[in-house]
Image (tube, grey):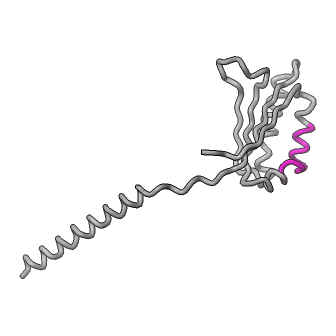
Amino acid sequence: MRRTIGAAILSALVAVTTMSLINSSQTSAQPKEAPRKVLRHVVLFKFKEGTSKEQVKAIEMAFGGLPSKIDTIRDFEWGTDVSPEGKSKGFTHCFFVTFADEKGRDVYLPHAAHKDFVKLVGPQVEDVCVVDYWTQK
């Protein structure tokens, strides 16, 4: 009788383990939910000749400070051109500002902190390129 109970328990454990493995493999095989699209605001700067390293650093820091001042900014990153192709046309800095939607961007553009930043950077910029796009996968 003990062997029968032990065998029954063992069979039950094997069955539960097998079902658990089958369920977990089915779950991981299911397609993942598509990531939510976000709105990216891309800004490229070409600085005027004679703009000092200190002025550029102040602009970098001021732009980087906007996410703490404007709560509709979901993500922020930036960098400088390192392309070996030589096609940057003098644009040295690229900034990515991410918003959940147009409403977030629409809060950002007229925001006092953004306007102050534009006043700071304006005199130092020879050219600026701005592109907004919805992310695609």
The magenta stretch spans which residues? 107-119
- Visible residue check, residue 64: no
**Front-lying residue, 128 or 73:** 128
**Picture mark count:** 0
Q: What residue sits 87% from the left and 40% below the top?
A: 117
Which of the 4 image quadrants contains residue 50? top right
The image position of residue 12, as x and y in percent, is 21, 73
Q: Quadrant of the C terminus?
A: top right
Left or right: where does residue 96 sit relative to residue 69? left
Left or right: where does residue 59 sit relative to residue 135? right
Which of the 4 image quadrants contains residue 5? bottom left
Left or right: where does residue 37 sit relative to residue 7? right
Q: Is residue 20 above or below residue 96?
A: below
Q: What residue sits 54% from the left and 57% below the top?
A: 33
Left or right: where does residue 70 sit relative to residue 17? right
The image position of residue 90, as x and y in percent, is 79, 21
- Visible residue check, residue 110: yes
Would residue 3 be counted in the magenta stretch? Answer: no
Q: Main secondary structure of the magenta part?
A: helix
Q: Is residue 46 above or below residue 95?
A: above
Q: What residue sits 18% from the left and 75% below the top?
A: 9
The image position of residue 24, as x and y in percent, is 37, 61
